[in-house]
Image (spheres, rainbow, N blue to C red):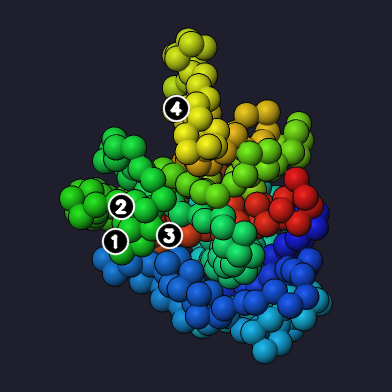
Amino acid sequence: MGKKLRFSLFGKSHGPCVGCVLEGVPQGTPIDMESLAHDMALRKPSKGIGTDRIEADKVDVICGIEDGKADGNAIILEIANGNVDDSKYLPFEETPRPGHADLPALLALPKFDIRGGGQFSGRLTAAIVAAGGIARQMLAAKGIVIGSFCHSIGNVEDCDERGIEDAKRSEGFPTRACTPELDAMMSDCIMAARKDMDSVGGVVECIVTGLPIGFGGIWFESLDAELAHAVFGIPACKGVEFGKGFDITRMRGSESNDAYRMKDGRIVTKTNNMGGVVGGMSDGADLVFRAAFKPTPSIGAKQETVDLKTCEDAELEIKGRHDPCIAPRAASVVEAVTALVLADQMERGL
């Protein structure tokens, strides 16, 4: 994705590595690898509420970075896969897992490697976070800051208005909740599902500060359209909404319009029902959107499927190591794709 800052993925879940190619980073751009390692750590599973598959997630720079700066060539990053278990996946070649890409992939891609979900696996988001970390640093140099948190997990919802400080504070909690109380309730919700050999979904809220009025494009280059396109590319994302989203349909225009006022010599909005975007461009308010992630489809409970060999109904039980809720780990991925989109638009002068 991207036009000026171009990003592409390679690899698969149980291959030797996953990685990415990032083109268009201006020569001389400083790149802090310690900051990149921090971003990678946030994507890792937390003990108890995450998968038992633990990877080192060390980012190896193949080329494009010299002496801590971009050298103007394409940046190629690789992340080794070291902790894989192929044995649990082979039965799914005949009995595809509900909720996964198995069925369409097996029928559409004759050489599809089903181990770990192959190229459809969330494992590839490690490379997205690595590239997004570089884009985040490019934006930070311009005063643009990105943060996210879990707005809800299962039926546990954060009902308070949150800002960028809350989003940054969530990095200290395993569930990416904004408070210790919400973290405890969200953890209990996840663990209850795990006990039942089941899973839960969640909603990640993303906040961006520092965008100047007019940042973005119009129509198919609009800020929200390009962000939605990228966020929907994250595995398991099933919905994206900006500002009040679908709830805005229950408001009147007199309520939904964000009134403009002057404050300390600059234009501000009294409310942020639009999520900081009008006409595809920033109105100067914080950019706010939410992404909905479905419950993890790999669950231990028995499920109904079909046998592709016999063409009969069948049942399956999924073994292996899986997150009972992916929303806490998805928060860092949402931030990464947001950074990639914004940095691309910034380089394009939108």
How far, Cα to Cα, is label 4 from label 1?
Answer: 31 Å
Which residue position is annotated with label 2? Answer: 177
How far, Cα to Cα, is label 4 from label 2?
Answer: 26 Å
Question: In front: mark 4 or mark 1?
Answer: 4
Q: Quadrant of residue 144 in the image? A: bottom right
Circles 2, 1 touching at the beta carbon (< 8 Å):
yes
How far, Cα to Cα, is label 3 from label 1?
Answer: 11 Å
Question: Vertical placement of 93 versus 310: above or below?
Answer: below
Dot 2 falls on a residue whose secondary structure is loop
Rendered location of residue 13, percent (x, y): 57, 69
Q: Which mark is residue 173?
A: 1
Q: Earlier in the sequence, mark 4 or mark 3?
A: 4
How far, Cα to Cα, is label 2 from label 1?
Answer: 6 Å
How far, Cα to Cα, is label 4 from label 3?
Answer: 33 Å
Q: Earlier in the sequence, mark 4 or mark 1?
A: 1
Badge 1 amino acid: Phe
The residue carrying pointer 3 sits among few (fewer than 14), some (14 to 19) or many (20 or more) residues within 10 Å by Cα, namely many
Badge 2 amino acid: Ala
Q: Nearer the viewer, residue 311 or 95?
A: 95
Q: Earlier in the sequence, mark 3 or mark 1?
A: 1
Q: Quadrant of residue 280 in the image? A: top right
Position of the N terminus, as image quadrant, is bottom right
Rendered location of residue 199, percent (x, y): 34, 49
Question: Vertical placement of 191 versus 134: above or below?
Answer: above
Q: Residue at x 55, y 49 (%)?
A: 210
Dot 3 falls on a residue whose secondary structure is helix
Badge 3 amino acid: Arg
Question: Vertical placement of 82 versus 238: above or below?
Answer: below
Query: Is residue 277 visible to the viewer in this orientation of the structure?
Result: yes
The residue carrying pointer 4 sits among few (fewer than 14), some (14 to 19) or many (20 or more) residues within 10 Å by Cα, namely few
Circles 4, 2 touching at the beta carbon (< 8 Å):
no
Question: In front: mark 3 or mark 1?
Answer: 1
